[in-house]
Amino acid sequence: MALNMLPPTLRENHRYVVFEVLSKKDIAFSGVVETVWKASLALFGDAGTSEMSLWVPGNLYDASKKKGIIRTNHFGVEKLRAAITSIREINGEPVVFIILGVTGTIRSAKNKFLGIRDLKDYMGK
């Protein structure tokens, strides 16, 4: 028996916030995730954070460039911006988060802000 999927009009609209971490030392992915969650919980509490539908995909964080992507719903973009800009340190290391941009798809986030091109971009659609 197949599961019924929600039609596109009832699905949650996601936004992808591309960020860069400025620091003197390398920052691990786990530190970024933990700090983003803690900042969001401190600023908005459990209810406000759960409304944002935060997700930080591990395969889209580049530790060498210190850039990554955070997914949220389209109502949570401004809340996420506020939470990210309130972060001052990760594991005792002073950091500054810079938001590079917001997009509607992972593909455009990678193309515009991370400089990652898909093979489809060169092969045609």
Image (cartoon, rainbow, N blue to C red):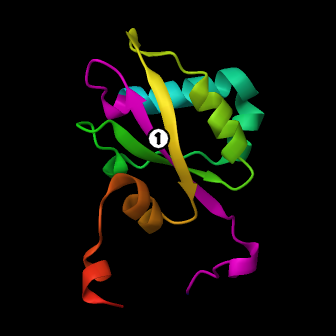
Compared with residue 105, is residue 24 higher up or lower down, i.e. above or below? Answer: above
Residue 7 spot, x, y in % from top left: 70, 82
Residue 46: say if magenta: no
Looking at the rendered structure, the number of numbered marks drawn on it comes to 1
Q: What amino acid is labelled 1 in the image?
A: Phe
Q: Secondary structure at mark 1?
A: strand
Residue sitting at 71 percent across and 23 percent down?
43
* Left or right: 98 in relation to 65: right
Q: In the rendered image, which quarter contains the N terminus?
A: bottom right
Residue 29 spot, x, y in % from top left: 34, 34
Residue 47 spot, x, y in % from top left: 77, 35
Residue sitting at 57 percent across and 30 percent down?
84
Residue sitting at 66 percent across and 54 percent down?
73
Q: In the rendered image, which quarter contains the C terminus?
A: bottom left
Q: Residue furthest bottom?
A: 125
Residue 78 spot, x, y in % from top left: 71, 42
Compared with residue 73, is residue 33 higher up or lower down, i.e. above or below? Answer: above
Compared with residue 38, is residue 9 higher up or lower down, i.e. above or below? Answer: below
Residue sitting at 52 percent across and 40 percent down?
99
Q: Residue furthest top?
A: 92
**Front one among 106 and 116:** 116
Q: For the residue carrying disc 1, how many other residues have a C-alpha within 10 Å: few (<14), some (14-19), or many (20+)?
A: many
Residue carrying label 1: 19
Residue 9: say if magenta: yes
User: What is the magenta range?
Assistant: 2-30
